Image (cartoon, grey):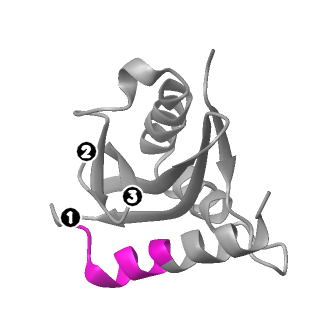
Amino acid sequence: MEFSVEFYETSLGRCPVREFLDELKESNPDDFAAVIAGLAKLRNRHYQRPPLSKPIGNLLFELRHVGKLNSRVLYFFMKGRRIIAVHGIRSKATKIPARDRRVALERKRDWLARNRS
């Protein structure tokens, strides 16, 4: 059984990860294709570990594509084999900036608060 990958949406219907991917597609189609392929691979448990993916704390994980600018999609797992992608970033840095960690954690909390089952 495979996992599903879902994108976080704000209460107003904005989808930050889709917006990130749309911008990436415009600015760097090759990196966009690599990130999309990485998201598809996450559906298989075998790929949910380095080098494609790794934990970053607070039960958040990163999907990572290394290039001139590192492209990352931050996500978390939910019951029912669900992966919820909450934030996308591009950076030359090897570490994820604290601000981006906070954004991802904030979106995770928001998603959990609005999706109690």
Residue 39, position as x, y percentages in the image: 52, 36
Residue 62 placement, left or right of 29: left
Q: Residue at x 60, y 60 (%)?
A: 17
Label 2 with label 3: CB-CB less than 8 Å: no
Q: Residue at x 26, y 77 (%)?
A: 97
Residue 32 placement, left or right of 4: left
Residue 108 placement, left or right of 100: right
Name the amino acid type tagged 1. Answer: Lys
Local SS, label 3: loop
Residue 74, position as x, y percentages in the image: 44, 57
Local SS, label 2: loop
Marks 2 and 3, the one that precedes in the sequence: 3
Task: Write down the region rendered in magenta.
Answer: 96-105
- Residue 92 is marked as 1
Quadrant where the N terminus lies?
top right
- Residue 59 is marked as 3
Q: Residue at x 46, y 74 (%)?
A: 105
Residue at the spot of label 2: 66
